[in-house]
Amino acid sequence: MHLLKINLEKVQERWWEAVLIDEPKINVRKIDPSRPITDLDDEAQAKIEELMYNEQQKRLGLPQSHEKVCSALCL
């Protein structure tokens, strides 16, 4: 079994039209970001809460969740 992992990091905080150049583009204007978080499954809700927490920490200049885990494990 072969496994290829690719990590993509955004330079700007915005929706992507596509991940790959020759991939069909989506119309990002049709995305409805107003969907209530409670409509999502538990895993998706947890991920969104983590992203919101990390964004707040980033704005305040404080360590984000992945940085806290690393510092706890790296000691």
Image (cartoon, rainbow, N blue to C red):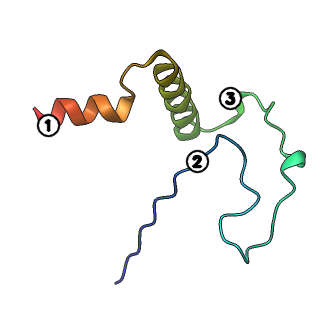
Q: CA distance from mark 2 to mark 1?
A: 27 Å
Given contact means CB atoms under 8 Å apart, are the residues at marks 2 and 3 in contact? no
Residue 7 placed where, x, y %?
46, 59
Dot 1 falls on a residue whose secondary structure is helix
Q: Which residue is mark 1?
A: 74
Farthest residue, direction top: 60
Residue 9 placed where, x, y %?
52, 52
User: Residue at coordinates 90% horizontally, 47% vertically from top-left?
Assistant: 30
User: Residue at coordinates 48% horizontally, 27% vertically from top-left?
Assistant: 54
Amino acid found under the numbered disc labelled 2: Val
Dot 3 falls on a residue whose secondary structure is helix
Amino acid found under the numbered disc labelled 1: Cys
| Location of the N terminus (image quadrant) | bottom left
Q: Which residue is mark 2?
A: 11
Query: Viewer-proximal residue, 40 or 13?
Result: 13
The numbered disc on residue 42 is none
In the image: residue 55, left or right of residue 18: left
As displayed, is residue 51 above or below residue 31? above
Q: Which residue is mark 3?
A: 37
